[in-house]
Amino acid sequence: MDDANPWTYASISIIKRQQLSVDSPKCQQEDDPEACIEDDVDLYYLPTEVAVHNTPEDCWLSYLHTVYDLSDLCKNWRDTREISPIIAHAGKDISHWFDHSRGDIKHHVDRVTGHSVPFCPHGPIPHVGTTSPVSTWRPIDRCPWWLDQRYKKGRLTKNSRPCRIINTLTGCSAIISVCEEDTIRRIQERFLIFNANGRHYDWKFEGKDLDMSKTLTENGIPDERERYTNCGLPSTIYIPSLLCYYRDDPTHDD
């Protein structure tokens, strides 16, 4: 189990030399050229969607507005001390572990050595290990897990908002939480759990066709909950309703 070796994480000088960052990772290793290559992932997730993946076998985390699936990391580091903080925070946001300005693990000055070392308040984590000088120390020769884009699932929404969807054929309706960044087509996918034939419907708001490639706000449906609250009204006093009209031709899809 090579991945489970308690390697000490490289010093900040090594990170600078490799020029790693979350936004533009470049740590392409000779033995694994696909590591840390940024891919175009524009799928957004709700915090509640991340929260349900909270076991070692199904471990999602969010940090720096991005969602990662660390299930493989948990498997590779199974039964090691280093994986315990990851499992303990499964399904949660761990952005407080990171320096937001650098997109990297936080560092602090060790009071014994006087050197800048990774700050791990919950104990050693994979690719960091002990921060004290030891004879077994060796620099990391691969992309650390928090910069490895292979674990990336998508983005964490900056705003979760309610949306009411009404099926005009059956009269049934449901209120679901959606991401501010979700397009109408993505909202349609979320609604499939209530209506498996949801793609055979035309989606409208106040009698106007919705642009399926745009978000609610881009379709002229802003989130006004803060405005209601400022006026002393309940934030849920009004929830936008999207109306679904069944098509006569069910073979036609968007």
Image (cartoon, rainbow, N blue to C red):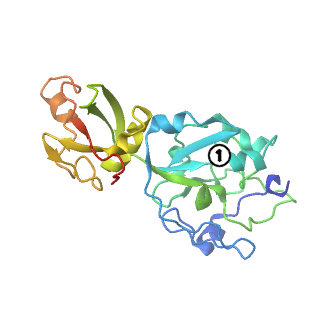
Q: Crowding at label 1, few (<14), some or many (≥20) Cα neighbours within 10 Å?
A: some
Q: Is residue 154 above or below residue 22?
A: above
Counting from the top left corner in percent of width and height, residue 200 is at: 33, 44
Of residues 48 and 86, the one drawn nearer to the viewer in this rendering: 48
- From the viewer's perspective, is 2 left or right of 51? right
Counting from the top left corner in percent of width and height, residue 224 is at: 19, 37
> In the rendered image, which quarter is residue 228 located in?
top left
Counting from the top left corner in percent of width and height, residue 130 is at: 76, 50
- From the viewer's perspective, is 72 left or right of 244? right
Counting from the top left corner in percent of width and height, residue 75 is at: 76, 46
Query: Which residue is located at x 23 percent, y 37 percent?
Result: 242
Query: Which residue is located at x 49 percent, y 53 percent?
Result: 154
Q: Which residue type does callout 1 highlight?
A: Cys
- From the viewer's perspective, is 155 left or right of 251? right
Query: Which residue is located at x 36 percent, y 40 percent?
Result: 198
For disc 1, the marked residue is: 120
Q: Is residue 11 above or below residue 99?
A: below
